[in-house]
Image: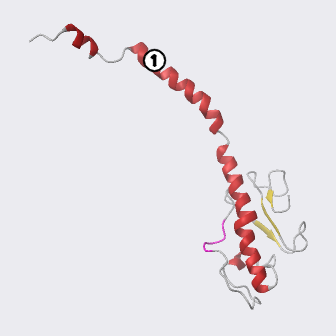
Amino acid sequence: MKMPTKILRDARGFTLIELMLAIIIIGVLVAMVAPRLAGRSQQAKEAAAHADINAHLSAALDLFEMHNGRYPTTGEGLAALRTAPPGASSWKGPYLKRPVPFDPWGKAYVYRSPGEHNRDDYDLSSAGPDGVEGTADDITNWK
């Protein structure tokens, strides 16, 4: 049995030109979208560090201070939020459910009490993406 010519013509598939045109369109779309997505991971890391410093760790430190009448010393550090330091008679922690987090770049947050910038309580910071403390990209609780 012979198939009609029209059916055979419709079943051929895509031509090389049609495939190349589709690839070019996809390439143009990727070229337009990729620059918008570049740098978003850095912004997300900075936002996470801000949230840790200004909300999560700050709230835990304030609870520690409310119960103990003082913030952890620099020597006790943020570890005092998980385990009772010596001399903390009213410690009601742990004040963090999980271990003390690292900043989004894998470094420890820098904690000082009393602070150099916040003399009445504490300084809390992240060295930021470059990992060097004291540079413009640092994320702090005093800026």
Judging by the rendered image, the residue that carries numbered circle 1 is 20
Q: Is the magenta stretch mostly helix, strand or loop?
A: loop
Comparing 102 with 23, the one in front is: 23
**Residue shown at 69%/60% (left/top)?**
103
48 up-or-down from 119: above or below: above
Residue 108 visible to an observer of this rendering: no
Q: Which of 70 and 128 is in front in this view?
A: 70
Asked if one can make out residue 115 in the rendered structure from this viewpoint, the answer is yes
Tally of numbered tags: 1
Check the image and report above or below for 51 versus 25: below
Toward the top, the furthest residue is: 5
Q: Classify residue 112 as left or right of residue 27.
A: right
Image coloring type: secondary structure
Relative horizontal placement of residue 82, taking residue 111 as reference (left or right): left
The span picked out in magenta is 97-101
Q: Where does the image place residue 116, in percent across and percent down from the top left?
A: 90, 68
Quadrant location, the C terminus: bottom right
| Residue depicted at 66% across the width and 78% down the height | 82
Q: Residue furthest left?
A: 1
Q: Residues within 10 Å of mark 1 (few under 14, many from 20)?
A: few
Looking at the rendered structure, the secondary structure element under dot 1 is: helix
Amino acid on which disc 1 is placed: Met
Q: Quadrant of residue 12?
A: top left
Vertical order, 49 against 60 (above or below): above
Q: In which quarter of the image is residue 102?
A: bottom right
State which quarter of the image contains the N terminus: top left
x, y percentage for residue 125? 79, 62
Give the x, y percent position of residue 4.
17, 9
Residue 73 image offset from top left, x and y in percent: 81, 79
Please name the residue shown 15% across and 12% down the image.
3
